């Protein structure tokens, strides 16, 4: 089976692990830098080219699209879709997951529980926005932020008003969410492949920090999920159309709350923490999905 991994860097841990897992199963695996691809958009014979070579004999695509390159990366994935190539995560699903507001609205329509969320752009009614989520403390997120960047905890109403005013002057759209005190600076990453959670871990924020992102100094721990948490993670991924996803959950008094759904989740932290060969799970699922379509 001929499988392409769309990734900017073949030396990244996740890309290397997927390559190794595919090679170990006897597949033809190749890493392609999607930004170096170009396309022939036509109804008769659509094509994707890489270094002058037509990538027309491909059975499956595993997209690893970086957030800054979502627009072009999803265009390349979409072109493979027009060529009837199986893509483990479709282009539309990747786009939905990268738009924080849109993804939260989709999850809300499907009845997925999440922190109470407000959205604002240029409104002067800062008081009204704060009231939508209850009161302080509250969390403010830039829509464009990733890996914990662009997230601020406002512990007082005055602080919240100051931060919102600053964001407004920057012409930035923001999400305002209730602060879940009982989570104590922790969240859960559930790694979904197909119809199951294959691995999970708990991320713990460093002392004095409320963000638990590993990139910001958080540590990881093994964590077993409840049936409700597993069902929530799988449903959240499927609502956005993703077969492979990292679903971030927070434990609260009213049950698991979805924070975010990541369409290109990293493997390094969670494989090391859980001991699960997630790369092999992804390759195995890809192969089974192709046989089903065939």
Image (tube, rainbow, N blue to C red):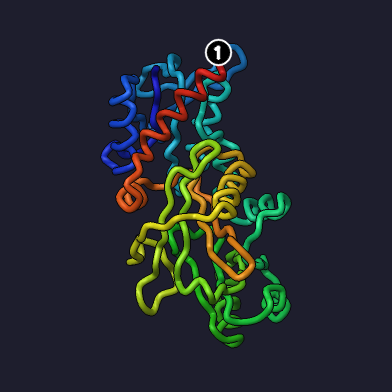
**The quadrant where residue 157 appears:** bottom right
Q: Which of the pair 223/185 is nearer the observer?
A: 223
Query: Can you tell which quarter of the image residue 105 is in?
Result: bottom right
Q: Residue at x 55, y 19 (%)?
A: 292
- The percent coordinates of residue 4 (x first, y second) are 39, 26
Foreground of the two, 10 or 28 = 28
Q: Residue furthest left?
A: 11
User: Which quadrant holds the C terminus?
Assistant: top right
For the point 56% across and 33% down, the residue is 90
Name the residue carrying label 1. 45
Quarter assignment of residue 51: top left
Residue appearing at x 42%, y 58% in the figure: 223
| Coordinates of residue 29 in the picture (x, y in percent) | 33, 24
Q: Is residue 42 visible?
A: yes
User: In this rendering, would 131 be left or right of 81?
Assistant: right
Query: Is disc 1 surrounded by few (<14), some (14 to 19) or many (20+) residues within 10 Å?
Result: few
Q: Secondary structure at mark 1?
A: loop
Q: Is residue 147 left or right of residue 16?
A: right
Say which quadrant the N terminus sits in: top left
Inspect this view and state whether residue 74 appears.
Answer: no
Could you say where residue 95 lies in the image, as x and y percent from the top left?
Answer: 57, 43
């Amino acid at each position: 089976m001929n499988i392409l991994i769309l990734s900017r860097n073949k030396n990244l841990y996740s890309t290397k692990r997927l390559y190794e897992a595919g090679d170990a199963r006897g597949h033809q695996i190749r890493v392609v830098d999607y930004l170096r691809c170009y396309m022939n958009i036509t109804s008769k014979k659509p094509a994707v080219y890489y270094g002058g070579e037509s990538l027309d004999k491909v059975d499956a695509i595993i997209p690893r699209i970086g957030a800054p390159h979502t627009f072009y990366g999803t265009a390349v994935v979409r072109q493979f879709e027009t060529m009837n190539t199986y893509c483990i995560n479709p282009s539309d699903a990747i786009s939905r997951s990268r738009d924080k507001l849109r993804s939260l609205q989709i999850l809300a329509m499907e009845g997925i529980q999440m922190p109470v969320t407000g959205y604002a752009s240029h409104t002067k009614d800062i008081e009204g926005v704060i009231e939508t989520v209850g009161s302080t403390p509250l969390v403010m997120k830039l829509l464009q932020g990733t890996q914990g960047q662009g997230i601020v905890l406002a512990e007082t109403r005055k602080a919240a008003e100051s931060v919102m005013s600053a964001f407004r002057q920057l012409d930035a759209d923001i999400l305002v969410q209730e602060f879940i005190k009982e989570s104590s600076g922790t969240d859960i990453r559930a790694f979904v492949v197909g119809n199951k959670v294959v691995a999970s871990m708990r991320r713990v924020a460093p002392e004095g920090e409320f963000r638990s992102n590993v990139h910001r100094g958080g540590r990881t721990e093994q964590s077993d999920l409840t049936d409700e948490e597993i069902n929530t993670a799988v449903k959240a991924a499927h609502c956005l159309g993703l077969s492979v996803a990292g679903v971030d959950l927070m434990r609260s008094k009213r049950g698991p709350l979805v924070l975010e759904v990541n369409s290109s989740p990293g493997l390094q932290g969670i494989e090391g923490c859980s001991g699960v060969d997630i790369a092999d799970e992804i390759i195995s699922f890809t192969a089974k999905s192709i046989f089903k379509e065939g």
